Image (cartoon, rainbow, N blue to C red):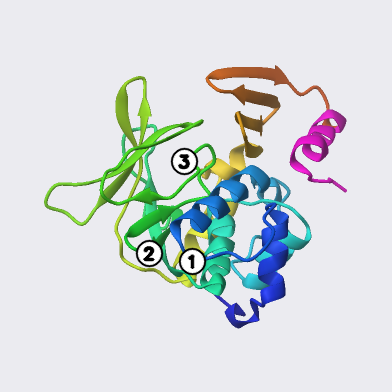
Amino acid sequence: MQNEMNVSQSNVQRYLERIGISGEMRVDYNSLRLIQERHMLSVPFENLNIVNGLPIELDWDFLYDKIVAKRRGGYCYELNGLLALILKSVGYHVSLISGQVFRNDGTFGPDFDHMVLLVHLDNGYIVDVGFGDSVRSPLLLSGEVVVDISGSYRIIPELNSDVLFFQKRFRGEWVSEFRFTLKPRQIEDFSDMNVYQQTSPESHFTQNLIVSKATPDGRISISGDSFIETIGSDKNRRPILSNDERNDLLKRYFGIAVV
């Protein structure tokens, strides 16, 4: 990623302020968990640039300006890309990992379909702030189940393979959401898929407006012309009747001012 060396202590502090953390962070599990949770409660997953035809660059200056200075959100390459640089600057050992997302037809997407982070502490932990409604704390690679307000999650390996599956429990059964290997990647490796996700009519992100953010007791989302509020397992969906109403919701719930 270009300009990695420009990640100053003031940049890190402004990011921490953006997600509601004061003081210095330690390089340990508890700090990592706090950063992940606070990021997901503060920074929306959103594709406004894509639906408005504005390019997304995988560059430190672009990501920092958009997410921290302008208090916007983004999708996986942006959210996890920025977080990787912040964590490295704090002192964490972080690798970028390529994920293949499970599709409705039962297949998995291509390499670099999703970006996720492998953070090396006493053990390896998967950290992901760019998959929308997902786990809010790091996941061990050992299969240990983590339960939070959004559900139950685990990572399991494929037999006789280096492939691992990120799974969520739905209606009593474990369902794979994406698969990955632990091969470290460079940010440039995601460039082609970043362009595809922004421009292809087959991309999920070019078809519909998506804005979503975790809340302490659930989640709030805009999906197309609907506003969705989830509290625990209860989901309330209502139509958005005008552009003015959508803009008001973006400002009120996500802190995004449309100009």
Q: Work out whether mark 1 precedes mark 2 in sequence or the reverse, and give the earlier one.
A: 1
In the orientation shown, which residue stands out farthest toward the left? 160
Amino acid type at mark 1: Val
Q: Which residue is under mark 2?
A: 121
Q: Work out whether mark 1 precedes mark 3 in sequence or the reverse, and give the earlier one.
A: 1
Which residue is at 33% across, 50% downward? 140
Q: Which disc is residue 27 wearing? A: 1
Which residue is at 79% across, 45% downward? 256
Which residue is at 29% across, 51% downward? 141
Q: Quick one: label 3, few (<14), some, or many (20+) residues within 10 Å?
A: many
Q: Position of residue 199 (x, y in %)?
A: 59, 53
The residue range painted magenta reads 244-259
Q: Nearer the viewer, mark 2 or mark 3?
A: 2
Q: Is residue 182 left or right of residue 41?
A: left
Q: Position of residue 130 (x, y in %)?
A: 53, 49
Q: Work out whether mark 2 precedes mark 3 in sequence or the reverse, and give the earlier one.
A: 2
Cα distance, mark 2 to mark 3? 19 Å
Q: Which residue is under mark 3?
A: 135
Q: Quadrant of residue 6?
A: bottom right
Q: Which disc is residue 185 wearing? A: none
Cα distance, mark 1 to mark 2? 8 Å
Q: Is residue 247 magenta?
A: yes
